[in-house]
Image: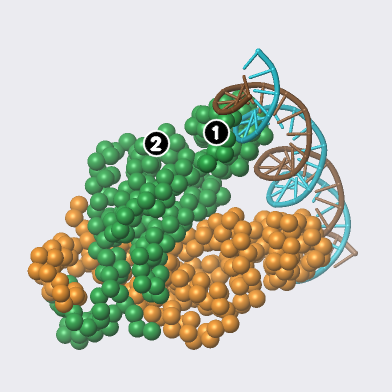
Chain colours: A green, B orange, C brown, D cyan
Amino acid sequence: MERPGGRGGQPRVATREVVLAAVRLFTDSGFEATTMDQIAAATGVSRRSLFRRFGSKEDILFAEHDELFSTVVRYLEASPDEPLTSVFSAARLVLQGYLRDPEITVPRYHLVRAHPRLRDREVAMTARYQAAFSSYLARSGDGEGRSLAAGVAAAALISAHNHVLRGWLRRPEQDSREVWAGFDEAMDFVRRAAEPMLHAERESRRDHVLVAVYPGGTGREELLRRIGAAVQGPEGS
Amino acid sequence: MERPGGRGGQPRVATREVVLAAVRLFTDSGFEATTMDQIAAATGVSRRSLFRRFGSKEDILFAEHDELFSTVVRYLEASPDEPLTSVFSAARLVLQGYLRDPEITVPRYHLVRAHPRLRDREVAMTARYQAAFSSYLARSGDGEGRSLAAGVAAAALISAHNHVLRGWLRRPEQDSREVWAGFDEAMDFVRRAAEPMLHAERESRRDHVLVAVYPGGTGREELLRRIGAAVQGPEGS
DNA sequence: CCTATTCTGGCACCGGATGCCATATGAAGG
DNA sequence: CCTTCATATGGCATCCGGTGCCAGAATAGG
């Protein structure tokens, strides 16, 4: 049912081929200086077909990224309970998608840094991830404040992911084990901040045991003030 | 020295007038259906001058938003110590900028929701805020992990801000005091999550007092596991 | 009045993007 | 083998956003 008939032909030139050729042209001559006619000439695909298959010149550069995004969304949709764990796995999937073929992602990173418009496009991609993660986290919630917590958690997660990703993109030659170690660290960092946020509403406000970390030199007043704020809880409408 | 000569003339038609006229056309006929020639005819400004002054058709819609961003950046640059407080104030400034003239921001919101390209543009704006906040937070840091914490904190802050902002944009007729109350709540929510992150590195790992909140029914093992994770601190390279 | 500086508008042009139509290719069915 | 159907393709005309170029207009200062 997906392809009504199932007949017809496959693209004469593979998508990946086109993307690679386009990336080469962009890095050599600059993104804006490269015309669709040049890409058409280089790939053997007509200008018209390029627009039909990719939608726009920018979309050629981000074609594989779009695929990755679709994969991640499908993964999330098929993912069972425990939202936080699933989302962390999804972020892992994204980073893996980048590390998998540096041949495209690395030059794309440099192009994106150079051209503001491409930068905006890249930002839009990460925003899509953020929205997907956020709605997934909010799905299993009790409504209301859940939305805020989910959004903030997703934003934190994406930010941490991008932090690690940028580190690799700047030096793609480094050992990938270091990258993954950094990723795990960053994810733990986010988990510590996000877990209490997302569970704050499941736990009722009363009947709590109080635990937190403060510097040894903290004064009594400051200590009491902070504890008071903590006990008040993340809500309070 | 800012304007080398200081002579010359002012724009014949005020920027705001052009923006308002453009917004009207966009909402009536759709964004893409509206041509620059129509805007030129409606405002009395020539097509060429429109491009010169605004850069692109999209930029007309976001002209005032760009001004707001510049204002916020200048505010941050002139802001004294205590980074977290300044950044919260900056976020307040942004929300204020929206509430100030709903005549532009509200229809723009609906346009942005309808057209993916404009949506990307809007997302790019918030990303600029996020970058500005992040670099400001990281400025007064000790380097290294500071960058991650600053980025995550900025992302969380922006997300919370946008959460409140969207709430207002959907129902701009509501009492603004409610909006500000929601804003304060959201900011407190973020502060509780962000403050420990940003101070985690100033405080040495040893010599701490342990305090935190857990549900009454938490089992001993789970309790010990979480405390162990908390004591380990947000770093650990 | 003359000059320097800026804003402005008209014109030509490039190139991205879309609609239309004709064609080719491969799979399913007779 | 031939027909049919769905898809991929390519050429063409066209729209329109965006830019470079140049000449005229407006304003402040000598």
| Relative horizontal placement of residue A75, taking residue A223 as reference (left or right) | right
Q: Residues within 10 Å of mark 2 (few under 14, many from 20)?
A: some
Q: Judge by depth and name the residue closer to the eye, B216 or B15.
A: B216
Query: Could you tell me how far apart the alpha carbons at marks 2 and 1 are, in whole angstroms?
Result: 33 Å
Q: What's the chain of the residue with tag 2?
A: A
**C28 over B108 or under it: above or below:** above
Mark 1 residue type:
Gly
**B37 over B156 or under it: above or below:** above
Q: Quadrant of residue A34?
A: top right
**Residue A13, position in %: x, y?**
55, 27
Identify the residue at horizontal 32%, vertical 48% (top origin): A92
**Residue A208, position in %: x, y?**
18, 79
Q: Quadrant of residue A226?
A: bottom left
Q: Which residue is mark 2?
A: A102
Where the N terminus of chain B falls, by quadrant? bottom right
**Residue A106, position in %: x, y?**
42, 39
| Relative horizontal placement of residue A186, taking residue D29 as reference (left or right) | left
Viewer can see residue A176: yes
Q: Which residue is mark 1?
A: A6
Of helix, strand and loop, which one carries label 2? helix
Q: Residues within 10 Å of mark 1 (few under 14, many from 20)?
A: few
Identify the residue at horizontal 28%, vertical 59% (top origin): A82
Q: Judge by depth and name the residue closer to the eye, B146 or C4.
A: B146
Of helix, strand and loop, which one carries label 1? loop
* Mark nearer the viewer, 2 or 1: 1
Q: Are marks 2 and 1 in contact (CB under 8 Å)?
A: no
Mark 2 residue type:
Pro
Q: What's the chain of the residue with tag 1?
A: A
